[in-house]
Image (cartoon, rainbow, N blue to C red):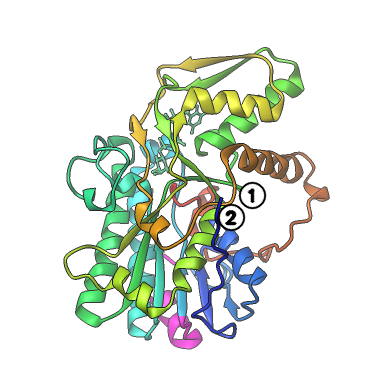
Amino acid sequence: MSHAVPSGSEIDRKTKIFVAGHRGLVGSAIVRMLQRLGFANLVLPSRRDLDLTRQSQVERFFEVERPEIVYLAAAKVGGILANKNLPADFLFDNLAIQTNIIHSAYRSGVDRLLFLGSSCIYPRLAAQPLKEECLLSGPLEPTNRPYAVAKIAGIEMCWAYNREFGTKYLAVMPTNLYGPGDEYDLESSHVIPALIRKMHEAKSKGLSEVVFWGSGTPRREFLYSDDLAEACVFLMGLENDRFLPLVQASDEPPIINIGCGQDQTIRELARLIADVVGFQGVSRYDLNKPDGTPQKLLDITRLASLGWRPRHDLRQGLKLAYEDFLHSHIQPRAFSPVAQAPSEGCGDPDKVAGESQSASSL
Ligand code: GFB
């Protein structure tokens, strides 16, 4: 598979970069990627120092720190049940965080900003694969409408500021994500960490059966978080002649899908995870739990035309995710990641609720 290595070429390695949500699934992957590429001037405030839902704190942070580039990966995120059970949290936290950051970034003259959206912004029954143009063309999936509405507001904000103030703010729409540092709490997690944990525990206890949610028929596309991070850094490093057309069109919002271009049913996913984990029992499906949208597959033509492709296929990514689960959840002391985010506090409000940023999958 041909593969573009992100160089962040357009950007000087001394540029001051603020990664909001640097302790979450997406933010931590972006930090690892930036560090690997030699970006040394990263601003990663602790939660104790900066609550992103507080406008005055965010304004002051930008006045003092003056970052030149912002990755907005902080968000309140969670799986289908968390979205359904905490609609006010998902709406308020996300609106507050993104409004505070985007507005303060504009006021302090931030050059490029990348806003993490989610594939759930697209209408529930939109034609597959989901093209960027189908935004706001039909009703949303009810289980995550508050989250989707907040993310759509973030896209509109980037677009409005680009048009009115000439900013260069880009909104990326990742498909469902998974990877190191994912959330494994079964009530709030997404499907991959939930299935890894359920099957691992069943195997460890010698149980012959696990129970999954819904019918198992919905189709989902999955992307490993390090691949998403690579795509984000790749996009932010594009030269002006390729970057500006993404953010300066007045007739369409500045959005671009990030996915792998393939989906499968939840049952097929479960079989693959069982294989990776080594679980040989039976899977049952609880029809009292929601299915969510029937299919969510992104059209990645726009991103592919810029020369980017993901590195990991699903099986490879699942193996890495399972290793991370074993190291960080089963043998915490043995884990020694390549580049670890600071262990003290975070600027990522989702941690308050015990959930990790996974962009939707964000
Ligand atoms: O990953 P997930 O929670 O989010 O669920 P969504 C995906 C599918 O897996 C659904 C099924 O059809 C679930 O019913 N599933 C089966 C399970 N077993 C399980 C399980 O044990 N745990 C979980 N969590 N799911 C979210 C949105 O939707 O996707 C967010 O709510 C965000 O807003 C995110 O957009 C990417 O893909 O359905």
Is residue 91 visible in the rendered image? The answer is yes
Q: Position of residue 233 (x, y in %)?
A: 51, 67
Vertical placement of 106 versus 310: above or below? below
Real-space CA distance between mark 2 and mark 1, rounded to the nearest whole angstrom: 9 Å
Name which quarter of the figure residue 318 lies in: top right
Residue 115: give its label: none
| In this picture, residue 97 sits left or right of residue 208 | left
Quadrant containing ligand 1 reads top left
The region drawn magenta spans 52-68
Front-lying residue, 120 or 351: 120
Q: Main secondary structure of the magenta part?
A: helix
Q: Position of residue 208 (x, y in %)?
A: 67, 12
The label shown at residue 226 is: 2
Instruction: Judge whether 164 appears above or below 150 on screen.
Output: below
* Residue 115 placement, left or right of 350: left
Residue identifier under label 1: 180
Residue 64 belongs to magenta span: yes
Dot 2 or dot 1, earlier in sequence:
1
Q: Residue type at mark 1? A: Pro
